[in-house]
Amino acid sequence: MKHTRVKDLLNSATILQTINAKGWVRTFRNNQFIALNDGSTINNIQCVVDFENTAEETLKRITTGAAVSVTGDLVESKGAGQKYEIKVSKLEILGDSDAEKFPMQPKKHSMEFLRENAHLRVRTNAFGAIMRVRSVLSFAVHSYFQQKGFVYVNTPIITGADAEGAGEMFQVTALPLDNLPKTEEGNIDYKKDFFGKHTNLTVSGQLEGETFAMALGQIYTFGPTFRAENSNTSRHLAEFWMIEPEVAFNDLNDNMDLAEDFIQYVIKYAMDKCGDDLKFLESRLLDEEKSKPQAERSEMALLEKLNFVLENNFKRVSYTEAIDILRDCTPNKKKKFQYIINEWGADLQSEHERYLVEKHFKSPVILFDYPANIKAFYMRLNEDGKTVRAMDILFPGIGEIVGGSQREERFDVLVEKMKALGIDEEELWWYLDTRRFGSAMHSGFGLGFERLVLFVTGMTNIRDVIPFPRTPQNADF
């Protein structure tokens, strides 16, 4: 008999039918009640075993983590909290799980312990819920752009270009590290490397994406990116996924409209499809915050926070206006900020971004027109000569979630900016070609997918929203 998913059984319109279910044992009580879960839903289905007519040896093998197959009748449940249960007529152990050795016991585990067991943590309620939400959000990303007629482009993972100018890149080489070939000057001879030049893992697909937007009109990328940034924080990963749309003929206002519409679409999609998982994650968050001091607790529950983003238009504020607000605000004057805002040109920190969103405007905020010297070379220079057409979207509890800009389409201005920053024109000859041949206004943005998953799930550490986190000194699994 073909097995039926637990989610479909719990949503079944017909009962008193013989069915088969397969899954993993979450708990086994009184030698009689199995809580079975197959990953299709946060909810378990109760399987009632006729223990008097089941071999003692089989009952002993029904342990947390064991894989089992149960056949029986789907009936209305006599117990509270569940609509249906399975009255088991046949039970088969598919895979044993040693109760004394299985790490994921039905008790509270620390997040650090779960990260050390990332290959098994998805069997817990919390991580099952997070990964289902992540999957749905991923589909929503493609759904949104495909409906809007965007072309999905796969940009290279191995590249010779540094889109961010950050210099924090993972080098890719096939050279023998114990016997590196050298030039006459004593430098590493990359001409003898696999690609004949110095290459790295990509930090962004944006530059390549721009070239496709200048032919296909509107494109998006959604793929892995890498930063060799030695940051052991709850907000940074060495490997993460980026969503980067790029649209020809869009100015900064069009770019802001697109980003706001996109974010609201994918959040609503997840709320519509993942109701049970999000309710569970909300209750988990509320429970976790009970142990925190009042000042450190979230002002909004998870679903309230998500609705806050859906129901409020994003407030658009220039960087200059934001600096004036921050300079004059009470936390700044009383030196409550870790980074005091004294003058125009300061690079805003998460504490400043959250103040603007949560305290001052009480809505999501889009900051625009940043100082040129704190933004990347490809952003369009404004007429004032000191700001660029950049924009960041700020969210409650998380700060920046999106960064984007109108791109510098003027060849001569772009070349001057590259020279000022010491960026080699020959390395990016192909990028400059898009400004030589049929250049036009265009804009785009980048959204770190894990930041989005972090926001939607209410988790507080980015390592808990990706299956196998890559961080400094950690590349297990």
Image (cartoon, helix red, strand yellow):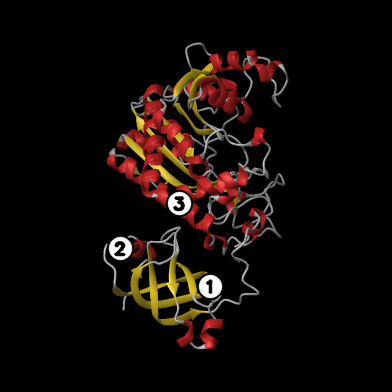
Q: Amino acid at mark 2?
A: Ser
Q: Nearer the viewer, mark 2 or mark 3?
A: 2
Looking at the picture, does residue 16 appear above or below residue 462?
Answer: below
Which comes before the other along the chain, label 2 or label 3?
Answer: 2
Q: Write the residue at 40% across / 30% down.
A: 311
Task: Name the element at disc 1.
Answer: strand
Residue 197 seen in the figure = no
Are there few (<14), some (14-19), or many (20+) residues within 10 Å of tag 1? some
Going by the numbered disc 1, the residue's amino acid type is Phe
Can you identify the residue that label 2 sits on?
12
Q: Secondary structure at mark 2?
A: loop
**Residue 318 rendering spot, x and y as whole percentages:** 50, 17
Label disc, if present, on residue 75 of the rendered structure: none
Instruction: From the top left corner, tell me how far across and down residue 260 is, in percent.
Output: 40, 30
Q: Quadrant of the N terminus?
A: bottom left
| Residue 380 located left or right of residue 293 | left
* Circles 3 and 1 in contact, beta carbons < 8 Å: no
> Which residue position holds label 3?
277
- Placement of 12 over or under 456, stated as above or below: below
